Amino acid sequence: MALRTVCTATLRTGTDFGVNNVRAFVTTALLCRQVPPLGPMPNDEIDVQNLESLEKYRSYTRYLRQAEEARNKPVWWKTYRNYVEKADPEHGARRVDIGLPYYRASRTKLVRERKAVIQNNKKDVELERACRLRTFKIPLDRVQETWEKDSGPHHIKRLADHYGIFTDLFPMAYFVPQVSLHICYRQDNSSQVLYGNHLTPTQAASPPQISFDAEEGSLWTILLTCPDEHLLDNEAEYIHLLVGNIPGGAVEAGEELCHYLPPFPAKGTGFHRYIYVLFKQVGPINFQEDVRQSPCYSLVDRTFKTVDFYRKHQDNMTPAGLAFFQCQWDESVTSTFHNTLNMKEPVFEFIRPPVYHPPQVKYPHRQPLRYLDRYRDGKEHTYGIY
């Protein structure tokens, strides 16, 4: 009986082994069988045996033109871009310029003007004497004015892209800030708002002084918002200042839709971005739906979205100016929460996990003498006491 069982098991094992070998052989044969492609493969028309017969490009411009044609030529296979666009439809989408039209002066005109300035400087005897004696002083006001008119708007746009301002305020859009904003929280210009500089909440506690160059009879809207400050919704903002229908550059004569509220970055949340955006209006706008009660100390009423505000009035206003600063918690934020907002101050702290030590071994080979200190009871350590 035992011999019969052993023989049956042996025969069954051999049969199963043969079946498995046949399955493996059939699977391998199927995988090795070449399937013809669905269309022509790249560089299929090139005769690799006779490369000398290929036509030479003869110039980089001709090569670049043919490369562009090959890249734009439709193919039958699925490219990496197709896979990414299917997963993220907005990948690679071009942003829309929603700002004022920008007119760049011709290069020839700029070169001619610079040559004229250089020739006039060479004829200036006093300028030559001051440079030779090293007493010449460069007027920084003129340098700032030239920068604001020449390359300043594009530099500010690059800074705004770096800080993610357009991504958070105007998704899939951007603008070149062509109107320079001059914002200062003190008379001595020590707390001036530039493009990403650091200010403390104490410095920004009082309403700022805002000025900008504007044509007579034009209307403007300015707002101050923070996309990093909202306590409940990551996609929402808190509006800190909103003034509309500003005649010319007189901000005080504008219609105050929401009065100024000092920054209040919560403790433990790092630096927050506070962004001033200036809009140029086509004409008077009815802001009845955007008016907040005065005084407005409710965070619910101050919840705001810049993109929704712009979409509502996009036919009557265009973004034209930009300035922003960074701010983090200090002692004045506690007073703002308790006295102004009348609420408890939220505090975000990092709870550090306990230090991990591997399990203790009985014979710690090649370990330092203080190896046992890691596993002592109590909080006092004796590192280095030997």
Image (tube, grey):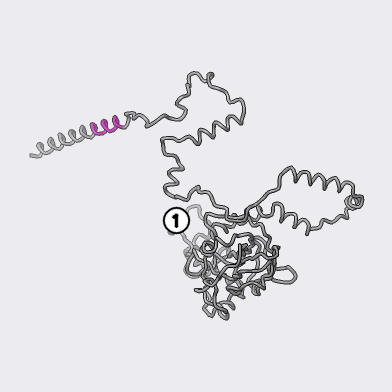
Measured as percent of width and height from the top left, residue 45 is found at 46, 24
Whether residue 110 is in magenta: the answer is: no
Which residue position is annotated with label 1?
Answer: 363
Give 180 or 347, whichever is nearer the viewer. Answer: 180
> Which residue does the image show at 47% across and 51% down from the upper left?
90
Give 288 or 340, whichever is nearer the viewer. Answer: 288
Prevailing secondary structure of the magenta residues: helix
Q: Is residue 3 above or below residue 230?
A: above
Residue stretch in magenta: 21-30
Give 71 or 377, whichever is nearer the viewer. Answer: 71
Q: Quadrant of the C terminus?
A: bottom right
Q: Amino acid at mark 1?
A: Tyr
Left or right: 82 as drawn, with respect to 337: left
Measured as percent of width and height from the top left, residue 253 is found at 66, 73
Q: Is residue 368 above or below residue 343?
A: above
Q: Residue furthest left?
A: 1
Which quadrant of the figure has residue 52? top right
Give 232 or 69, whichever is nearer the viewer. Answer: 69
Helix, strand or loop at label 1? It is: loop
Left or right: 5 as drawn, with respect to 334: left
Left or right: 84 as drawn, with respect to 228: left
